[in-house]
Amino acid sequence: RVVGWSIADHMRTDLVTDALRMAARNRGGLDGSLFHSDHGAQYGSRAFADLCTQLGVTRSMGAVGTSADNAACESFHASLKRETLQGAHHYGDATTCRMTVFAWLTRYNTRRRHSANGYLSPNEYERRHHAAKLTLAA
């Protein structure tokens, strides 16, 4: 399930810190979470490290030059581009981009079925998993 995202026309640190803050708000906190990334400068910044510490997030970076280390993220972005751009090279303008990506992320979380989730949407998988954990804990 995608719980935090940010769209910008730059790759500065606030792009990823905005997404991480959104995830923390949507989850009610991120204490004990793991954030895996590549070696982009924004992930190595002091501001990002400080925010991760503040939120209780452990940072993890893949090995340099090992694309397989980040395969899940790369696959996700390939699906996003393929399904929203449909062969085009750009969205046209920033507003169209934001609206298109937001609609796709909403569909991804609520309706898009995944074989890794037993062909359930991420939201439904999470709902069932959470209900099962509550039953086990009771």
Image: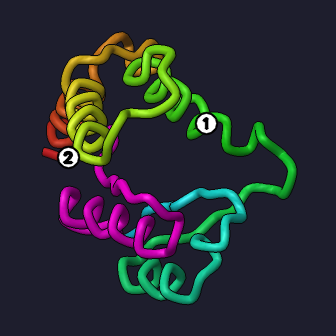
Q: Amino acid at mark 2?
A: Ala
Image coordinates of residue 104 in percent, x first then y, are 28, 28
In this view, 46 is above or below 27? below
Q: Residue beneath label 1, please? A: 74
Magenta span contains residue 19: yes
Q: Residue beneath label 2, please? A: 137
Image coordinates of residue 97 in percent, x first then y, are 31, 39
Which stretch appears magenta? 1-30
Q: Label 2 crowding class (10 Å Cα cut-off): few <14, some 14-19, many 20+? A: few
Image coordinates of residue 20 in percent, x first then y, are 36, 65
Q: Could you tell me how far apart the alpha carbons at marks 2 and 1 are, in whole angstroms? A: 36 Å
Dividing the image into 4 quarters, which one contains the N terminus? top left
Dividing the image into 4 quarters, which one contains the C terminus? top left
Q: Residue at x 52, y 34 (%)?
A: 77
Per the image, label 1 sits on a secondary structure element best described as helix
In this view, 69 is above or below 75? below
* Residue 55 appears in the figure: yes
In this view, 74 is above or below 6? above
Per the image, label 2 sits on a secondary structure element best described as helix
